[in-house]
Amino acid sequence: MISANGRVEVDPAPAPNLDVAAALFHGLSDPSRLMILRHLTTGEHRVRDLTDHLGLAQSTVSAHLACLRDCGLVVSRPEGRASMFSLTSAPHLLGLLEAAEQLLADSGHAVALCPNYGIGTEGLPAPEELRSHTKGTGA
């Protein structure tokens, strides 16, 4: 909630669903699972389709789909000898992914350089360019 002076007010009492939200984000914390979810935003796919499109092994795709299904993010239905996978709540998931992309754009390279969960400097601009992105951000 935003107060009259434009500051964000946060209820100091912990929300009862923070553990569940953390579990959701943990389920989303693998790049392969995010690739699968992104691909499923285009519609239903078989495991074979996903392995072909994403260049991942069948066992990898199956394991990640099982995780996503256990988290309630995807469902499957039989079609012949195959299973068709789709998103359970495509509009909400798309909104979450778009919000994450905007947050990453707003934070510059701070997330990638985070000492706890960052990916380091691989694929990022040269150090002098990084300094200009993090000036004034406390990073």
Image (cartoon, rainbow, N blue to C red):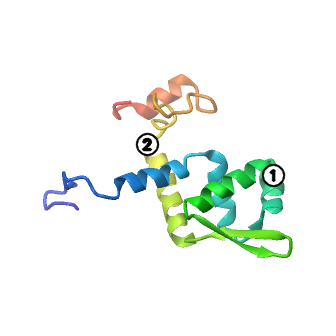
- Residue in view at x 55 percent, y 52 percent: 28
Quick one: quadrant of the N terminus?
bottom left
Q: Nearer the viewer, residue 97 or 48?
A: 48
Secondary structure of residue under mark 1: helix
Image x and y of residue 94, in percent? 55, 65
Name the outermost residue toward the top.
127
Q: Looking at the picture, which amino acid does disc 1 mark?
A: Gln
- What x and y, as percent, mark residue 15? 28, 57
Q: Which mark is residue 107?
A: 2
Answer few, some or many: residues within 10 Å of disc 2's Cα (few below 14, many 20 plus, some between 14 and 19): some
Residue found at x 50% / y 48%: 26
Q: What amino acid does circle 2 point to? A: Ser
| For residue 126, above or below residue 105 | above
Picture quadrant of residue 76: bottom right
Separation of marks 2 and 1 at Cα, in angstroms: 35 Å
Residue depicted at 78% across the width and 49% down the height: 59
Work out whether 137 lies above or below 67.
above
Q: Earlier in the sequence, mark 2 or mark 1?
A: 1
Count the numbered circles shown: 2
Label number found at residue 135: none
| Residue 89 picture location, percent across and down | 55, 71
Question: Crowding near pointer 1: few (<14 within 10 Å), some, many (20+)?
Answer: some
